[in-house]
Image (spheres, grey):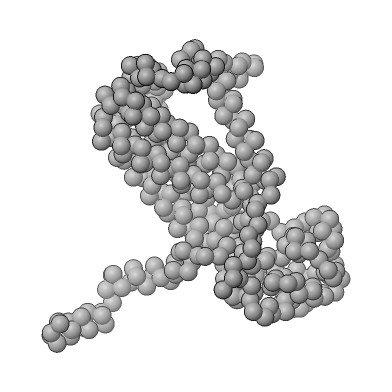
Amino acid sequence: MSAQSADTFAVGAEKDTWTGRIRRRGLEELPPDRLLPDRQPAYVASWIYVFGALSIGAFAVVLLSGGVLAVEGPSWWHKSNAGLFVNSLHMWSTEFFFMFMVVHLWAKFFMAAWRGKRKATWITGVLAFALSIAAAFTGYLSQQNFDSEWIGTQAKDGINSTGAGAFWNVLNFGQMLMWHIVLLPLVVAALIGLHVLLVRRRGVVPPFAPTDRQLAKAGLSLTGAVTAPPAASGTAAQIPAGLSTQIPAGLSDEALAALIELPAQGPPAQEPPPPSLPGPADAAAPHEPAAEGPAGQDPMWQLPKDES
Amino acid sequence: MGHMGMSGGTNTLAALVHLGGTGKYISWGVIQISLANLIIIAVMIVLFAAAIILPFPKHEARKK
């Protein structure tokens, strides 16, 4: 590389360019360890948290099988055994996509997953679900059989009654096919991508703080002086700030987890630090995330502010 | 046609499920739902309950 071209790069690097701004903003919002984390908070160790990933897996099969159908065409998917198989794969992966998405929706609804600045995550999920319904509907219209004709003629009056029929004609096969294989998949994929990025940015919503009854069931109480819990083997724990807690000795990890967050299934710290317990002065800032979690735990996994 | 190449097992399954037949509907007052949709909803509810109740497998902590 000549000295002149090196100088050119050096001068360009000093300028405030839009590419540089995007890069800095991207690294600030989504640093690599947050974008692709290798640790998860302890509370996601439940089957109810797998349905988002299952939905994405099913969506990938939908896209792949749909791509094969687009290459081969209607004669192939109606008449050949391989075509019938891929056609069925496309339909059943869609069924599973919706089934997983609905269970994911139920779980996140009952978790109030929009808490802690996660409203955009919730909204992108709702939009992805709604547009997936439109994508599935246009898929029914694109089957190229009597079923699709029947659905189109039955649906046209309903669509026309909304006024959308003026520009979105369910009897126009070419238009419905383009919506099904180009526009809607692109928008749904973009929304799912944005949804996942937002989950990475804000973290998975933590469970609700335990109630007095749940604490009592676990042998804990929220009254009295703060006493340090025993240092469990391989466990580094931190009481969320503001929780004045009296913890009896000899708690199991499960009982401790009812009150506090444990690090994910990663390696324990060499020397687990003693739990950081808040003093009375901390009581004014309930659920404030710690500046640095235990055992190198990312602050994003701490209990966030409840802004709902 | 595609169904001409079906195996014996597939024919048996098709005879049990009657995929080509008229859909069965369940009516309860103003509510009307196909049996297939009702089964799908029931499966989702079972899936939801099982995901909450069933224990998640624990892994040993990774060693450095």
The quadrant in which the C terminus of chain B is found is: bottom right
- Circle count: 0
Which residue sits at x=80%, y=55%? A214
Horizontal relation, residue A174 to residue A53: left or right: left
Image coords of residue A224 (percent x, y): 86, 71
- Quadrant in which the N terminus of chain B is drawn: top left
Expressed as whole percent of the image width and height from the top left, the position of residue A90 reads 40, 34
Quarter of the view holding residue A44: bottom right
Relative to A88, is A307 on the left or the right? right
A295 displayed left or right of A150: right
Q: Is residue A232 above or below residue A53?
A: below
Question: Is there any visible trace of residue A260 in the rendered image?
Answer: yes
Q: Choose top left, top right, bottom left or bottom right for residue A217.
A: bottom right
Q: Residue furthest top?
A: B22
Where residue A47 appears, x then y in whole percent? 62, 48
Q: Is residue B15 left or right of residue A60?
A: right
Outermost residue, bottom direction? A3
Q: Is residue A237 visible?
A: no
Nearest the viewer among B17 and A9 is B17
Looking at this view, is A197 or A16 the one in front?
A197
What residue do we see at 51% from left, 14% from top?
A: B15
Residue B20 is situated, as x and y percent measured from the top left of the image, at 46, 15
Query: Residue sitting at 64 percent across and 79 percent down?
Result: A270
Q: Nearer the viewer, residue A302 or A145?
A: A145
Instruction: Check the image and report above or below for B1 versus A249.
Output: above
Residue found at x 67% / y 66%: A262
